[in-house]
């Protein structure tokens, strides 16, 4: 097929706009902030499960500690009761037995209090760890908000640029003859990269592959209006 040089150059302009549009789409799709957001979200999720686990662990120990607290209270009440019985008792044998019991109750209370102390220390350690994770989570949450905001702003800016290119493309497309447009669209759908490019300094500016002087001579020997394709990238090779 044939097309005027003017028409062929319009196709080259169209290809530049299509390339620009693709670049914006690709920049939006592969924006580095997307990776950052995935990583931060991942970190936050990990911290959240750590926090849940630590809270559950501390909760179990708190239950045990509260059971000990009840037991201590019972032992203390029993000792007090024994003490008041001693105060009102007159039987020496009974008093001695009571004193022994009070002694063993005191030992029991000591033992239970030591056990409780160990649990309280464990709870304190878990709480400290959980607070540190909460702080980290807060830091990541701020980072996530920032990254999400930045990505959103960048995507909006890219969309504005892409919309503008799209508008320009629509205007330009109306100026290109139907047959050439059809050819262009077919090449565009079948190949990556530019669908039309100029031959500059003996190289196709679509794929930047240089032709030998003989090849250039042969290409240029054809009618300039004849639609020729680059052997390498299959774009419409415009010799003007
Ligand atoms: Zn090429």
Image (cartoon, grey):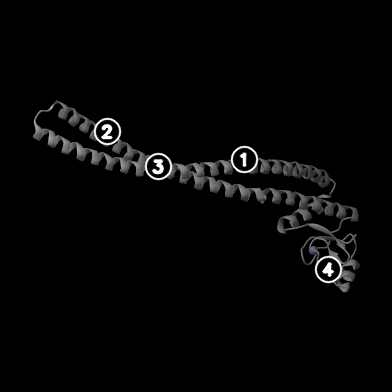
Ligand 1 - quadrant of the structure image: bottom right
Q: Can residue 235 be seen in this view?
A: yes
Q: Residues within 10 Å of mark 2 (few under 14, many from 20)?
A: few
Q: How far apart are marks 2 and 4 (CA)?
A: 94 Å
Q: Earlier in the sequence, mark 2 or mark 3?
A: 2
Q: Residue at x 80, y 67 (%)?
A: 209
Of marks 4 and 3, the one in the foreground: 3
Q: How crowded is mark 4: few (under 14 residues within 10 Å), some or many (20 or more)?
A: some
Instruction: Indicate the position of residue 35 as horizontal and vertical percent values.
Output: 62, 51
Secondary structure found at label 4: loop
Q: Mark 1 and mark 3 in contact? Answer it, CB < 8 Å.
A: no
Q: Earlier in the sequence, mark 2 or mark 4?
A: 2
Q: Which mark is residue 73?
A: 2
On the image, numbered disc 4 is attached to which residue?
Answer: 210
Q: Which of marks 2 and 1 is nearer the N terminus?
A: 2
Q: Can residue 56 be seen in this view?
A: no
Quadrant assignment for the C terminus: bottom right
Q: Distance between the residues labelled 2 and 3?
A: 21 Å
Secondary structure found at label 2: helix
Q: How far apart are marks 2 and 1 (CA)?
A: 50 Å
On the image, numbered disc 1 is attached to which residue?
Answer: 145
Q: Which of marks 4 and 3 is nearer the N terminus?
A: 3
């Amino acid at each position: 097929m044939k097309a005027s040089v003017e028409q062929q150059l319009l196709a080259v302009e169209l290809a530049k706009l299509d390339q620009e549009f693709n670049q914006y789409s690709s920049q939006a799709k592969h924006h580095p902030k997307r990776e950052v957001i995935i990583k931060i979200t991942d970190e936050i999720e990990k911290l959240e499960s750590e926090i849940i686990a630590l809270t559950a662990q501390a909760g179990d120990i708190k239950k045990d500690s509260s059971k000990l607290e009840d037991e201590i209270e019972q032992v203390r009440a029993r000792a007090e009761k024994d003490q008041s019985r001693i105060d009102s008792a007159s039987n020496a044998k009974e008093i001695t037995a009571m004193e022994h019991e009070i002694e063993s109750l005191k030992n029991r209370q000591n033992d239970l209090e030591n056990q409780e102390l160990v649990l309280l220390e464990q709870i304190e350690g878990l709480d400290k760890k959980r607070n540190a994770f909460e702080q980290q989570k807060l830091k990541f949450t701020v980072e996530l908000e920032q990254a999400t905001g930045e990505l959103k702003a960048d995507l909006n800016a890219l969309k504005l640029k892409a919309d503008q290119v799209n508008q320009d493309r629509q205007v330009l497309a109306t100026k290109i003859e139907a047959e050439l447009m059809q050819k262009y669209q077919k090449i565009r759908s079948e190949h990556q990269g530019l669908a039309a490019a100029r031959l500059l300094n003996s190289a196709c500016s679509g794929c930047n592959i240089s032709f030998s002087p003989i090849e250039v001579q042969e290409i240029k020997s054809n009618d300039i209006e004849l639609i020729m394709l680059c052997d390498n990238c299959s774009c419409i090779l415009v010799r003007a």
